[in-house]
Amino acid sequence: MSPSADAQFQFSSPAGLLLVRTTLAKHIQFEPHDWQLEGVCKMLDGKDLVAIIPTGGGKTGYFFMYMLMLLELSQNPSLCTPPVSIPHDPCMIVVYPTNGLEEEQAQVFDKVGLKTLVINAETSSVARRSGEDIWLSARVGIAMVLLSPEQLATRGFESLIQHRPFQSRFRAFGVDEIHLLNSWGLSFRQAFRQLGHARARLPLHVFVGTSATVLAGTSETGIYSFLGLHVGDFHLIRRSNLRCNVQTIFRTLTHGLGRWTFPDLKWILDSKRKTVIHCRTIALGFRVALFFWRCLPCSVDRAKRVRMYNALNWPSYNIKTRLLMREDPEAQIVIATATFMVGIDIPTIQDVVIVGALESADEHVQWEGRAGRGTQVSDARCITYVTSKSLEVARAICDGKEPAAPRGKKNTGKQVATRMDDSMARVLCAPCFSAEQDALYNNPPHDPPCSCSSCSSSLAPPSPLPERSCICSRCFPEPAPPPKEKTRAPDMNPVPRSQRISRKMRAKGVKELTSLRMDIYLSLDTTVSRSFPPEMLLPDIVIKTMLDRFALLETVDTLRALVKDRSLLVPHVARVWEKVVELREGFEVMRAKTKARAKEREALRRAAKRKRRDEEAEGELVEDEAQVSVEVDRYVLSSAGQPLVNAPGRTGLGSGEETFSFEWQLSGIQ
């Protein structure tokens, strides 16, 4: 609670609300939303605040509107009766999850007249190199101190909060994106777990926490408990986090993510829409960016059209990326990691494309919130590409079964748990994405209407859930794409197939030419000539081209024409030609051996065929003789009037005379 909690003047009253509205009108160029004024009034009354409102709903306003009111009240205590006691130089500490978000918010605070200081690893390093102590600068004259979570455990932060003059002017402690306590705070950013400890060490203050994605249930109560908040002791503002102006679409990948080509994403270049593509790893993002760069013609500024945004880039590069996406129509695509997920406000973004299933529904809602933040975007979309394996895992989680482990690995449950939690599985399996989001976040069925001028004049005011028409891809499935005809890639090799070298020849050629490359490189006797790697002397692509067109290398002039653009190789063409002649002789020997083996195999095949034919003919003759014997027995027995079933066979025909006569008669019949 704040020292002003015992003040008699109640800002959360009609008179207080009017005072705050009129006072803020002097400092900002827009009219605040009703839910922003509600929260600021509660904070001025000394009440802690938790605001759960949608992305783009004005969470930043709680921070700067509260500080603007404190500054105004410190200069004019008589604005309210009885007057409130505010130090002349009030200060607020706000913790942000990423450096990029700190820089974005610092610009917002500077625009409204609040002196701001950003303290993170980057700014601390810059100050240290210039011989300055950035924490000393925060003690006096700074209204907004923006920190990264890692700074809460530093000696500089401890010295700041123990400084008596700073304690007297410290008024509020804010945390943006409090939901990250349960995601980043439990995995790769455990510094988030310092928030609760830091708040306990701070002087008496007002706390404000904001987020768009606090899952209802144990996740929400866990966040409150860790921050030292008790239900009933703080004011909660909860509005639906659905973005009805953004269409939610899920698509199944037709190609894997381990490739260097991504045909599923090719349409993004052709659409020319401002797009942010989320890739979980920097390595995947680089491969996607390289695919787009290769698809673009040389006449296009590829470095501007497609840019990467991640924590390994220089901060100045990321800042320029955000600026280009806002102002330059030629900047179309940003391939970003999680550093772009929270708080980045670029009103021109039309599409958000998520490559691969996310870990939680929080991430999906946050990424969806990057699109359609400006009034000029009317057809914003969030398109998530998931693999068929992710869908199987989601169904198994929803059915209460243990997801199948990858091939060759024992299923311990740990690998799947790190990829997808229950909330994301429910979203993937839901018959309606919007309805499932309402259930996960306990969204109110009706948001109170806002009386500000921007909401009142909106052509599409917020509508209650039962009357809202959902446009997600489950309620309105996308039309199935037409089946693609399989076409064979054109053969660009000018050498006829009958004259091309075999795989064994190619392997031998690569080995020999690579060895020649190293021999030439080691023969160079100057330091300058040895200042580049051997691959630059005879690149692999040149070796491949030589072997592809080996039949066309008839003279040394044809070889020289082939490598004329390789200035480092031109002086050594004679040695390369000697190797080509040597390879040609070796290839001829290999061809002769291959033909000899083919003839030998053909001869063996023909001999086996003749043998099989002879065996079949002999078998047919034996079968004919046996059939004649059976017919003779039948004839003799039928003439004697004996039953055929008891016939004794040819040995019981009688004397040789009778047998001869019968055979003569039989031969006469034939």
Image: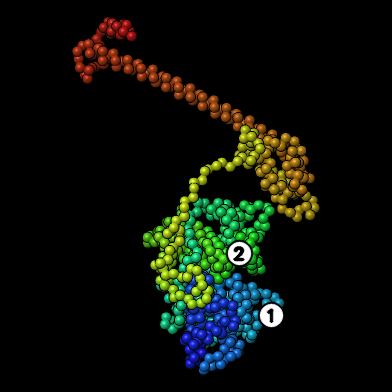
Crowding near the residue tagged with mark 1, few <14, some 14–19, many ≥20 C-alpha atoms within 10 Å: few
- Vertical relation: 55 (above or below) 63: above
Q: For this rendering, which residue is in front, 336 or 641?
A: 336
Q: Amino acid at mark 2?
A: Tyr
Residue at 60%, 64% (x, y): give it.
309
Give x and y (percent) for residue 356: 51, 58
Q: For this rendering, which residue is in front, 589 or 14?
A: 14
Residue ID for mark 1: 132
Crowding near the residue tagged with mark 2, few <14, some 14–19, many ≥20 C-alpha atoms within 10 Å: many
Work out whether mark 1 precedes mark 2 in sequence or the reverse, and give the earlier one: 1
Residue ID for mark 2: 309
Residue at 57%, 58% (x, y): give it.
284
Give x and y (percent) for residue 275: 57, 61
Q: Mark 1 to mark 2: distance in Å?
A: 30 Å
Q: What label does residue 393 carry, if any?
A: none
Give x and y (percent) for residue 494: 66, 37
Q: For this rendering, which residue is in front, 377 or 600?
A: 377
Give x and y (percent) for residue 630: 29, 17
Question: Can residue 170 be seen?
Answer: no
User: In the image as oriented, which residue stretches furthest toward the right?
Assistant: 526
Residue at 79%, 51% (x, y): give it.
525
Question: Can residue 301 be seen?
Answer: yes
Q: Amino acid at mark 1?
A: Glu
- Vertical relation: 580 (above or below) 669: below
Q: The residue tagged with tag 1: helix, strand or loop?
A: loop
Residue at 65%, 32% (x, y): give it.
589
Q: Quarter-wise, where is residue 124 in the image?
A: bottom right
- Vertical relation: 599 (above or below) 576: above
Q: Quarter-wise, where is residue 667 in the image?
A: top left
- Vertical relation: 251 (above or below) 40: above
Q: The residue tagged with tag 2: helix, strand or loop?
A: strand
